[in-house]
Image (cartoon, rainbow, N blue to C red):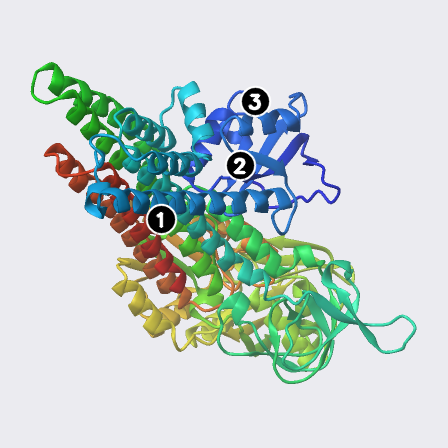
Amino acid sequence: MDATSTGSPHGRDADNREGGARKLQFRVAGMDCAEEVSILRSALSSVASEEQLGFDVLNRRLTVHLPEDRVVSADRIRELVAATGMTAAPWSAGAPSGEARAGDRARKLLCALSGALVVAGYIHHGMRHGLLHALAADGDGGAFPVASTLAYAGATISGAWFVLPKAWSALRRLRPDMNLLMVVAIAGAILIGEWFEAAVVSVLFSLALLLESWSVDRARRAIERLLDLSPPTARVDRLDGKGATDVPIEDVRPGTVFSVRPGERVPLDGVIVSGASHLDEAPLTGESTPVAKGPDDEVFAGTINADVALEVRATRPAEDSMLSRIIHMVEEAQARRAPSERWVERFALRYTPIMMVLAIAVAVIPPTLGLATWGTSVYRALVLLVIACPCALVISTPVSIVAALAAAARVGVLIKGGTFLEAAARVRALAVDKTGTLTRGEPVVEQLEPIDGHDYEELLAWASALERRSNHPLARAIVAHAESVGVHAAPAEALRELPGRGAEGMIDGRLIWIGGHRLVHERAVETDKVHRIIEGIESRGLTAVALGTDRHVCGVLGLADEVRPEARGIVARLHAEGIKRVVMLTGDHRVAAERVALATGVDEVRAGLLPEEKVYAVEGLGKVYGVVAMVGDGVNDAPALAAAGIGIAMGAAGSDVAIETADIALMSDDLARVPWLIAHAKRTLRVIRQNVTLALGAKVVVMGLAAVGAASLWMAIAADMGASLVVIANALRLLRA
């Protein structure tokens, strides 16, 4: 499903073109769980394939991707949705439409009315024949008082009002679901004169559906709270120079300068123009320590300015801020079904018709064989139908997944779907890049050795010119060092990156290259002197970077990167979480890599690797350990991230590439998020297993009671609703993770 919310400001259907295809979007009232998604997928199969349909339960959004040559109107899609008992309205970003809110209110009112009528009918019945007698069908010699019967009938109709169209749709499609199960049970109870139990089944099922909708709303509000982090206006200087005015963030264009006072939240992504302060980035990254920011540093919407007033130039529109991207990604992620969700859906698809056939057998076979009366057998069959309702089972998994995704987003861990969340729980080997993960990723130039009469400043200028446009930590360190000693150079001409080896470009009409020991070998310019210099630098645990022409090496730089002090403890935590092998993959030379490995306690070092060699390493680990996670920066390690079972990008805040390439993005550069992620994924799987066990266990118990005649209709629906309440409450515990 497309994560972009396409609004329709004039009330028309959201209809636009993407890559030669039309995209229609609707808000579907009543789409609250996987059961409704399955119904809609079947109903729309005549106009769109499964791949062309996108379902966002969290926002009740239906997306239909249609090829240009496929003529299907929005009205036709709304008709097909209406046939299922749900309603589709034009999608618009933001709050639900008035029609959708009216539908939600109607559901609540009818449920309340149904409950009130049951209570009124029961009290009237009890006043006539006693409260205990009112629980039975024959409180008045086999007949209910007229007033009570009317109250129970009204309760039954109002409680089942929104269920009846869905049940009719299921019957027409010959695909029995929980709605049809309930309607058959209610109709059967009425036919055998059990008005009280028919009404109780109706009201309790209506209440169960409301609870289901509430649980989804709870998860939805957890996501919306992220959006509330961004203030609705930005303080922008007036054009007439008479002070500042508050402008809605939607109207602020990139390039506009706005101010942020101490204690205020930043309204838009931007770059600091003036001022220096500390910003609390916890809402985005989960990082608890405020980060020092100054001129030219990037700031993000939703973060909090702590100390000094800042002037910030907006770099992105509000709808494209990092905060908005996070929200859209979480919304998109919950629409991707996890393996456990697909299993539950497939199970329910087969389970429901089997239960209906079993109920028919229970109703017909015993009286046919003379083992029971027809009334007793039909009643037991109805109890079986009610307890067979897969409501609690169907909702048990998606609510857990959504809650887990929302909780992870709140601590700066963006997971692109339940599939990757579940995979994280099964990771047995972890491959990590060295620079920026196990080390701080902020290397410094400690040494520069000119060779063959070249000048120190000349070499530094060349190195800076070649590395100025690179994002690699070593490149940034070289440029920063050059500027710190007053050497400024324009980028080289005809600049070309050499993946995993370095770069080359034209400087003053000459081809100059920069790279590691591997590139020196490739250029066949290594002399004994060059070899001794590089070996001496590497023996100190530094990273050697050579600079040269097509004829000889002109100089060698030595850079050091500090190991993260917390890295050893994090590696130990990974082992404690069941990771069998932590392997460091790096393009750096072995001595520097082993120095880091010794300090951090990783199990294995593979040094001097090109990007494609990291891919082979990850694939090899996968053959031995199964699911392998790769942790990198999402740019240089993109091939290895893609090859791994799970690609985890670290320090993704501000990096569009990292967010797009990885399956999971850690917004901060805190490696401790990785063991937290694995523990969170395992906890989520435990909750899902608990929920499935509870949902099925409750059914088995009541079915056993029904088999011996010890269970009634209202007891069955109460047990089913109780199971739904338990699994919802258990799933929502994940929001507190």
Image position of 428 (left or right of 115): left
Q: Earlier in the sequence, mark 1 or mark 2?
A: 2
Q: Quadrant of residue 90?
A: top right
Q: Quadrant of residue 303?
A: bottom right
The residue to which callout 1 is attached is 423
In which quadrant of the rendered image does the C terminus lie?
bottom left
Closer-to-camera residue (493/110):
110
The residue to which callout 2 is attached is 54
Mark 1 vs mark 2, CA separation in Å: 22 Å
Q: Secondary structure at mark 2?
A: strand
Closer-to-camera residue (343/555):
343
Q: Earlier in the sequence, mark 1 or mark 3?
A: 3
User: Which residue appears at 38% of the width and 72% of the height?
Assistant: 567
Question: Mark 1 and 3 residues: CB-CB less than 8 Å, in contact?
Answer: no
Tell me the amino acid under the disc marked 3. Answer: Val
In which quadrant of the rendered image does the N terminus lie?
top right
Against 370, is 636 above or below? Answer: below
Image position of 654 (left or right of 358): right
Q: Nearer the viewer, mark 1 or mark 3?
A: 3
Q: Nearer the viewer, mark 1 or mark 2?
A: 2
Tell me the amino acid under the disc marked 1. Answer: Ala
* Residue that extends furthest to the top in the rendered view of this protein: 368
Q: Quadrant of residue 463?
A: bottom right
Image position of 331 (left or right of 492): left
User: Which residue appears at 62% of the width and 51% of the height?
Assistant: 95
Q: Earlier in the sequence, mark 3 or mark 2?
A: 3
Report crowding for label 1: few under 14, some 14 to 19, many 20 or more residues within 10 A (C-alpha): some
The residue to which callout 3 is attached is 47
Tell me the amino acid under the disc marked 2. Answer: Gly
Report crowding for label 3: few under 14, some 14 to 19, many 20 or more residues within 10 A (C-alpha): some
